Image: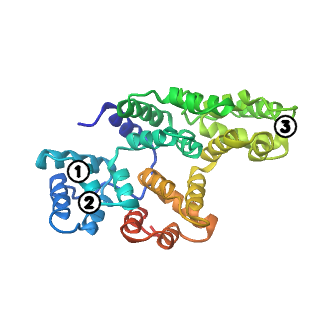
Amino acid sequence: MAAEFIIKYRLARAALELAGTMLAWEDFDAEADADALRKAMRGIGTDEDEIIEILANRNNEQRQEIKEKFTQCFGKDLVDELKSELRGNFEQAVEALLDAPPVYDAKCLRRAMAGAGTDENVIIEIMCTRMNEEIEAIKEAYSAEFDRDLSEDLESETSGDFKYLLVSIAACGRDESDEVDEDKAQEDAQELFDAGEDRWGTDESTFNRILVTRNFNQLRATFVAYEGVAGCSIEDSINDETSGNLQTGYLAIVNRAKHSANYFAERLHDSMAGGGTDDDTLIRVIVSRSEIDLLRIKAAFFVKYEKGLASWVEEDTSGDYKKILLGLIKGDDE
C-alpha cells in the first residue's frame, strides 16, 4: 500500500500539464511483470535486456505495483534481488526507477548532506525546482526514510543567506496560482532594483522574499518589468550582486520560472561535457523528469546544443547503463 505522501504526490502531479517520455503501459499486468523479472534473475547470468524492457516502459506508479506484487508472489524484495544481480551505474539507475519520486528525491538530498562536505548543487537542483506539494511529500519521505527533519538538516548543513533561502523554500509558502498582477510585478521589480543594483551591497532578504513566495507566472512578469527598471536582466543583476551557492540558487529559481526545461537541459549537458561523466546527475535528471517534462527538456537541449540528448547519452555512456537511459529518453525525435 502506497504511503499517504506518495498518494498526495500523485494527485498533485495529475493536476499538472505533463510532457514526459514515460507513460503508463497500456496492457499492464503487475503479476506478469513481476514473474518476468524473477525469471530474468534466475539461473546462470542475468537477462538485463528483459529488466530494461520492463522497467524502462512502465511509469513509476506501475513500478510500485510490480514491487508490491513481487513481494506478494515470491516473498522477496524486488530492489534487493536486483541489487544482488546488477552493478555500477546500471544498478544505480534501476534502483532510482524503483523508488517513488519523493522517496528518490529524499534519498538524493540525504546523500548530498551526509558525510564530509555537502553537495549544494544537488540540493539546489531539487529544492529550487519542485512545487509545494512535491516538497511536502519529500519532507514526509525524508522523515519516513531517515527519521530526520529535512528543514533542520538543510539549516545545519548550509549557512548564511543560502541557508535562509533553502529554509524558506522548505516552508512551502509559494503562491501557486496562475494569476498575474502587473502592478505588483512593477512594484516587485522596483524593490529588487532598490535591493541590489541601486544600493551599496545587496539586501538578500528582499530577493529571498520575492523569489520564494511569488508564483512563477508572476515572477516572469516581474522579470520583464525589471528589465525596464534596471536596464538589464534579472540574471545580470544576480550575477553582479551575489556569488557562490546563493547566486546558483537564485538563478535556478529564475530559470525554473522562465523555462524549467532550459535549466534541466543545462544540467544534463554539464553532466556529460568535458572529461568524465557526472553519472549521479545524469541519472537523477533523466529519471526524475521522465514523467514530467523530459520531452520539453529534449527540445530545449537540441535548440541549445544543436545535438539531441539521446545522441549525447549514446556517445557518453555504455552497456546496459546506456540502454536503460536511452529507454527512458525514447530517442531524439519523440
User: Is residue 3 something one can see in this rendering?
Assistant: yes
Residue 197 tag number? 3
Query: In the image, what residue type sits under mark 1?
Result: Leu
SS at mark 1 in the image: helix
> Which of the pair 272/275 is nearer the observer?
275
Residue 102's spot in the image, x, y percent? 40, 40
Query: In the image, what residue type sits under mark 3?
Result: Glu
Task: Give the farthest residue toward the front.
Answer: 116
Label 1 vs 2, first from the N-terminus: 1
Measured along the vertical axis of the image, is residue 87 above or below residue 314? Answer: above
Separation of marks 2 and 3 at Cα, in angstroms: 57 Å
> Which residue is denoted by mark 1 in the rendering?
78
User: Is residue 19 something one can see in this rendering?
Assistant: no
> Which residue is denoted by mark 2 in the rendering?
85
What is the crowding at mark 1: few (fewer than 14 residues within 10 Å), some, or many (at least 20)? Answer: many
At horizontal 32% and vertical 35% (from top left) the residue drawn is 7
SS at mark 3 in the image: loop
Q: Is label 3 in contact with label 1 (beta carbons under 8 Å)?
A: no
